[in-house]
Image (tube, grey):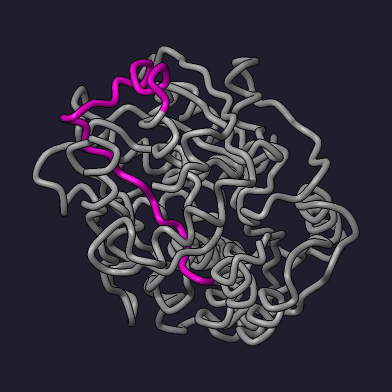
Amino acid sequence: MNATFKTTNVSYFLTKASFSNEGVNTLPSEGFDRAEREITGWDGYAKTPLESLERLAEQLNLREIYYKDEGPRFGLGSFKALGGAYAVQCVLARAISQRVGKDVSLDDIRNGIYAEQAAQITVTSATDGNHGRSVAWGATRFGAQCRIYIHAEVSEHRAEVMRGLGAEVVRVDGDYDASVAQARREAEENGWLVVSDTSWPGYTQPPLDVMAGYGVMAREIVRDLPTPPTHVFLQGGVGGLAASVAAVFQQEWGAKAPQVIIVEPELAPCLYASGKANAPTLVEIQEETLMAGLSCGEPSELAWSVLAAVSRGFMTIPESVVAPAVRLLANGDASQSAINAGESAVAGLAGVMWAASDPQAREDFNLGTGSRVVLIGSEGVTDPNVFQQIMAGEI
C-alpha cells in the first residue's frame, strides 16, 4: 500500500452519536419511499454496482470494504443524478400546481401533461459540476429552462457538459459559496426557481427533495448487503450525501447501523468545524481543493441536523492523498477489477486507508479484523483531463 497513507498528517476527533429522533426524522422514510418509486421508474434506471475491495481489505487487515460505484448512474457520472433531477421534477410539480390551481403529480410532470407551463419556468442552481449536471439534465427531461452558476475554479470541461445538457452556464468570480449567493440573488430578481442541494433559513424543501433522491443509492446498498456493515466513511461537502446515507442506514438497520465517520478536505472543513462547534459553522475557503465537489465552506443546515445526531467522528485529509487513492483504484490495486473514479469519490477511501494504518486511529474508530466498511464512490471520471493528469502523475 502507498506509504503516503501511513505517513500523512490527518486531523480527526470522535463524537458520541445521540441518534435523536429530531435529527433522523429530518429525512423521513416516506420521502425516501416517494423518491424511490419515482426514480426507479425513470427510463435508464439501473442499480449501480457495489464493488468489493478485497485486496485493499486484506492489506488493511479488515474483513471487507465495499465501494458503491456511482460512475454509471444515468450516464451522468455521479450520484448527483439521483438528487438534482428529482428535485427539479418536484419543484415543477409544486410550482405548476400553484399556477393552475389544482394538484399536479410527479406522473403529470414526467408524462409532459403540463409541458407548456413547464417551458415557461426557469430552474437555477449553483454547482461545482455534478449537481448542476443533474439539474440541467432534469430540466431538459421535464421541459423547463435552466441556468447554472459555477465558480471561478470549476473546469471548463464540466461547464461544457452542462451546456450540452441544455443549461445556460454563468461563471462567477469567487468560490462555491459566492456562486450560491449570486444564484439566489438573481433567482429572486427574475422569479426563477432555485434547485439547490444546500439549505438556508426559509429554504428547505428542494434540498429535502435532493436528499430524498440520494436515498435510492443508500437503499440499493442495504439490499445488496446480507448484514449491516460496521463502518461507513462518508465524504463531506455541504453534507447532503452523508446525511441521506446515514439516515437511510439508521432507518433500515436501527441499532445495528454502522458507525458514521465524515471525511473532508482539510481545505474545506465546514462539517469538521461544525462538529467541533456543535453547530453549523461557516469556514472561509482560502484555496480550492482537488476534490472539486467537496469544496464547500458552508454546511446545509438540514443535513447538519442529521449528521449531528448520527456521526461518530470527523476527519480532514490533505490534498496529497487524493491522487494516490484515485490511482490505487484505477490500477486494480484495491480489487480484482480496475475502478475509474473522480477526485471527490475517494475521500472516504483515503480516510479509511489512513485510519486503518494508524494504530491510535484504528483503536479509536474500533477498526479490526472483523470490520466491514462501506464507501461511497460518489463519481466516476467527470473530468477526463484531470483524471489523465492524475494517472500520469502530474497531480
Q: In the figure, residue 129 lies in which quadrant?
A: bottom right
**Quick check: can you spot residue 101?**
no
Examine the structure image and report whether residue 269 is included in the region drawn in magenta. no
Out of 325 and 379, give the one closest to the viewer. Answer: 325
Above or below, 232 relative to 161: above
Q: Is 374 on the left or on the right of 114, as rendered?
A: left
Give coordinates of residue 71: x percent, y percent. Answer: 41, 69
Please tell me which residue is depicted at 64% across the width and 46% down the height of the picture.
Answer: 319
Give coordinates of residue 136: x percent, y percent. Answer: 61, 75
Out of 160 and 53, give the one closest to the viewer. Answer: 53
Q: Is 258 on the left or on the right of 326, as rendered?
A: left
Above or below, 238 relative to 332: above
Examine the structure image and report whether residue 370 is included in the region drawn in magenta. yes
Please tell me which residue is depicted at 60% across the width and 86% down the height of the picture.
Answer: 116
Give coordinates of residue 117: x percent, y percent. Answer: 61, 79
Give coordinates of residue 131: x percent, y percent. Answer: 58, 62
Q: How many marks?
A: 0
**Which residue is at the far left?**
226
Q: Is 61 on the left or on the right of 215, as rendered?
A: left
Query: Which residues make up the magenta segment?
Result: 358-381
The quadrant of the rendering that contains the C terminus is bottom right
Q: Is 226 on the left or on the right of 342, as rendered?
A: left
Out of 53 and 226, give the one closest to the viewer. Answer: 53
Please tell me which residue is depicted at 76% across the width and 50% down the height of the picture.
Answer: 288
Please tell me which residue is depicted at 48% across the width and 75% down the height of the picture.
Answer: 76
**Quick check: can you spot residue 18?**
yes
Q: In the figure, residue 119 lies in which quadrant?
A: bottom right
**Which residue is at the far right?**
173
